[in-house]
Image (cartoon, grey):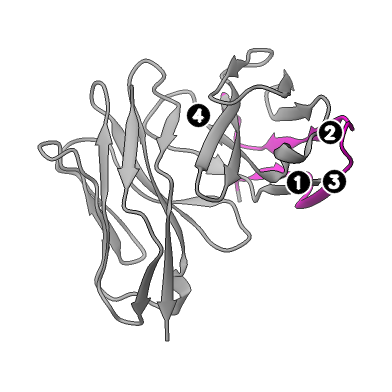
Amino acid sequence: DVKVTQSSRYLVKRTGEKVFLECVQDMDHENMFWYRQDPGLGLRLIYFSYDVKMKEKGDIPEGYSVSREKKERFSLILESASTNQTSMYLCASSPGTGGLGYTFGSGTRLTVV
Amino acid sequence: GNSVTQMEGPVTLSEEAFLTINCTYTATGYPSLFWYVQYPGEGLQLLLKATKADDKGSNKGFEATYRKETTSFHLEKGSVQVSDSAVYFCALSSGGSNYKLTFGKGTLLTVNP
């Protein structure tokens, strides 16, 4: 069964910590995405990548960075976690051509205290 | 730019009631349209899609028809079940970044026995 795997379902970190959220897909997809989901705001795109070592900013990249050293893995990095980054983080992947939609991971609920 | 507007929830129905969740869009070119579903505590799953005007997507008793003249993609189900309780997202992909999805804010559906 093809899937997108996020390394943690729940994570609690302290303010100021550097946080790594990992995402791995086994479908050989070219595109990978990181979203955050907050009540009343829907899904907001943080960063995406359409190829290895390539990245593009989404709508809310401030306070985040990403890394894609291998095709199957896309990491989201919170350089210095803050309480306003408490959220549900969703990773997704899709093939290179459009019209096929995304496959999502199960999400990581991050709490910054 | 691209945008998706879906009816605000929450929507509360009794089991076996008819469901409609409205979705309208603004897009350049000829978008592909999607409905995703998110069950409690999980990531998003693709429910159905349509890639050209007048196409009907269907899955698990849900249907949506791509209406170019009204720029709409309303989700319908004839008889909802308690297990359909979830958040439903309408989305589109279009334009030069054909692999990037634009999401609506989601509609929470609760079905009572």
Q: Do labels 3 and 4 share a chain?
A: yes
Looking at the image, is B42 positioned above or below residue A66?
below
Q: Tell me which segment is drawn in magenta.
A: A2-30
Using residue A54 as the reference point, say whether residue B53 is left or right of it: left
Comparing A82 with A43, the one in front is A82
Real-space Cα distance between discs 3 and 4?
Answer: 37 Å
Query: Helix or strand or loop: what does disc 4 sit on?
Result: loop
Residue position marked by numbered label 2 in the rendering? A19
Q: Do labels 4 and 1 share a chain?
A: yes
Determine crowd level at label 3: few under 14, some 14-19, many 20+ residues with C-alpha closer than 10 A: few
Residue extending farthest bottom: B113
- Tag 2: residue type? Val
Q: Which of marks 4 and 1 is in front?
A: 1
Residue extending farthest left: B69
Q: Between disc 3 and disc 4, whose residue precedes?
A: 4
- Tag 1: residue type? Leu
Q: Between disc 4 and disc 1, whose residue precedes?
A: 4
Contact (Cβ within 8 Å) of mark 2 with mark 1: yes
Q: Which mark, residue A95?
A: 4
- Per the image, is A16 magenta? yes
- Tag 4: residue type? Pro
Q: Between disc 2 and disc 3, whose residue precedes?
A: 2
Q: Nearer the viewer, mark 2 or mark 3?
A: 3
Residue position marked by numbered label 3 in the rendering? A113
Taking the spot 41% from the left edge, 33% from the top edge, the residue there is: B102
Read off the chain for label 3: A
